[in-house]
Image (spheres, rainbow, N blue to C red):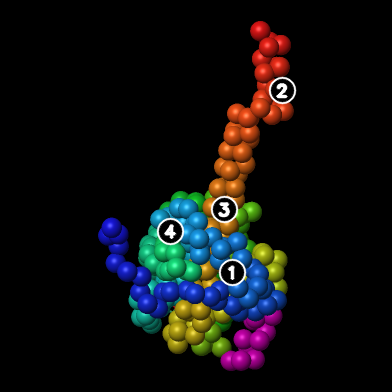
Amino acid sequence: MSVLPPVRRDRIVAELPQCFKKEACLHTKDSFHSKVTNACKQQRTGTVGFKISKVIVVGDLSVGKTCMINRFCKDVFDKNYKATIGVDFEMERFEVLGVPFSLQLWDTAGQERFKCIASTYYRGAQAIIIAFDLSDISSLEHTKQWLQDALKENDPSSVLLFLVGSKKDLISPSQYALMERDAIKVAKEMQAEYWSVSSLTGENVKEFFFRVASLTFESSVLAELEKTNARKIGEVVRITSNDNNLYLSTRKNKSKCCQ
Ligand SMILES: Nc1nc2c(ncn2[C@@H]2O[C@H](COP(=O)(O)OP(=O)(O)OP(=O)(O)O)[C@@H](O)[C@H]2O)c(=O)[nH]1
Ligand SMILES: [Mg+2]
């Protein structure tokens, strides 16, 4: 019997949420990978439903990391700045293609003096969200350094990257267009998926986190299937080697030879 409360009805994902900009996204497919859909239908997702996936949010001080997480998790917005000291985290439970999926969102401090504490929590992330302020170009310029630091503690080949511009409500459409052009360029260089949001109005916040959850889920299931396949291949070799086959005779011959 599960001791966890049921997943909120507005955290249920039945279809892959689409990317924000086709020019800078992790993949442009319309739906989940067929291997993932089949595994979910057949309840072959292994430990994915029991594990908690870690997502870290990094970026300059005051770019709006905490507000973004609070808008998504609690649907609140605080206009007063309260610096995050070290780290904080929120848990969000989803149900993706019928499988329970938990995300742990780690909100890290952007202030230099807390960076040392915060960076000790970077390890083991399945996704990294690098945040910048759309009204402050220098925060975009610093994103590469944030990424570099976060990647030191993680496997660059498997971690999913998201570059997200915040405070969209503060700039005009023409300023936004210029900023977006630069941000997409940076996202492409990083091989990250680009999004822009406003925590004040809530624009794109839910869509963004749903996309993060869905792509993290997809990659967790694919990794789990790969692990299962690797185990199966091992088993096939073991089973066939019990049979009277070439491997066995080779081994027998070998052992005779050594006697
Ligand atoms: N207008 C507007 N202001 C925002 C938005 N997001 C955050 N802010 C404001 O920006 C300031 C900083 O927001 P935080 O979320 O605390 O920033 P942070 O990145 O967590 O900062 P650190 O914890 O120091 O790293 C606060 O005063 C927020 O109210 C937004 O979408 N629009
Ligand atoms: Mg904060």
What residue span does the magenta drawing correspond to? 172-182
Q: Earlier in the sequence, mark 2 or mark 3?
A: 3
Circle 4 residue? 49
Where residue 70 appears, as percent x and y from the top left, is 39, 74
How packed is label 2: few (under 14 Cα within 10 Å), some, or many (20 or more)?
Answer: few
Circle 2 residue? 250
Q: Disc 1 to disc 3, how far (Cα)?
A: 14 Å
Q: Disc 1 to disc 4, how far (Cα)?
A: 17 Å
Residue in front for this viewpoint, 55 or 92: 92
In the rendered image, the vertical position of residue 238 relative to residue 55, given as above or below: above
Residue 10 visible to an observer of this rendering: yes
Q: Earlier in the sequence, mark 3 or mark 4?
A: 4
Q: Earlier in the sequence, mark 2 or mark 1?
A: 1
In the rendered image, the vertical position of residue 53 relative to residue 183, given as above or below: above
Please state which of the two labelled residues, at mark 2 or mark 4, is closer to the viewer: 2
User: Amino acid type of disc 2?
Assistant: Thr
Where residue 39 appears, as percent x and y from the top left, is 54, 60
Q: Disc 2 to disc 3, how far (Cα)?
A: 31 Å
Point out the residue furthest to the top here: 259
Where residue 22 appears, as percent x and y from the top left, is 68, 77
Residue 210 on the magenta segment: no
Q: Disc 3 to disc 4, how far (Cα)?
A: 13 Å
In the rendered image, the vertical position of residue 20 relative to residue 213, given as above or below: below
